[in-house]
Amino acid sequence: VEETVEESVSETVEETVGETVEEKVGETVEEKVGETVEETVGETVEEQVGETVEEVIERTVGERLDEMKAEVDAVDERVDRRPREDEVEELIDNTAEQTEDADDERTERDDG
């Protein structure tokens, strides 16, 4: 009888301990897997959002820089097309000289 009781108790203890260990291990594994998945997904989402925001900023800044460069180039073209002050003065002087020369020639012909 004692042997049977010992066997029964031993079997019961083994079953109970085994079930308890399996439950605890299962719960612990589930918790750890859950935490790891949450952390990994969270980090991945943060990285992707960070990269996406960074890409949008780079693209937007790049587009704006391109627009500004085009505007600056347009202003440069307009400035380049305008005669400079010294060119205007030279043109006026040349025109005045040509007019004087023409007047002198007419005067010489008329006097001649």
Image (tube, grey):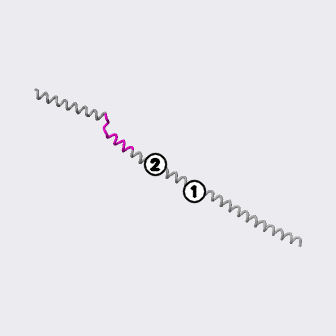
Queried whether the magenta region covers residue 39, the answer comes back as: no
**Mark before the other along the chain sequence, 1 or 2:** 1
Check disc 1 and give the amino acid type. Answer: Val
How dense is the environment of label 1, judged by Cα within 10 Å: few (below 14), some, or many (20 and up)? Answer: few
Q: Is residue 62 left or right of residue 24?
A: left
Q: Secondary structure at mark 2?
A: helix
Q: Secondary structure at mark 1?
A: helix
63 or 31, which is in the foreground?
63
Q: Cβ–Cβ below 8 Å for labels 1 and 2?
A: no
Queried whether the magenta region covers residue 74, the answer comes back as: yes
**Most common SS among magenta residues:** helix
How dense is the environment of label 2, judged by Cα within 10 Å: few (below 14), some, or many (20 and up)? Answer: few
12 up-or-down from 83: above or below: below
- The residue carrying mark 2 is 62
Image point (36%, 43%), residue name? 75
Residue 45: quarter of image: bottom right
Give the residue at the far bottom of this rendering. 1
Check disc 2 and give the amino acid type. Answer: Gly
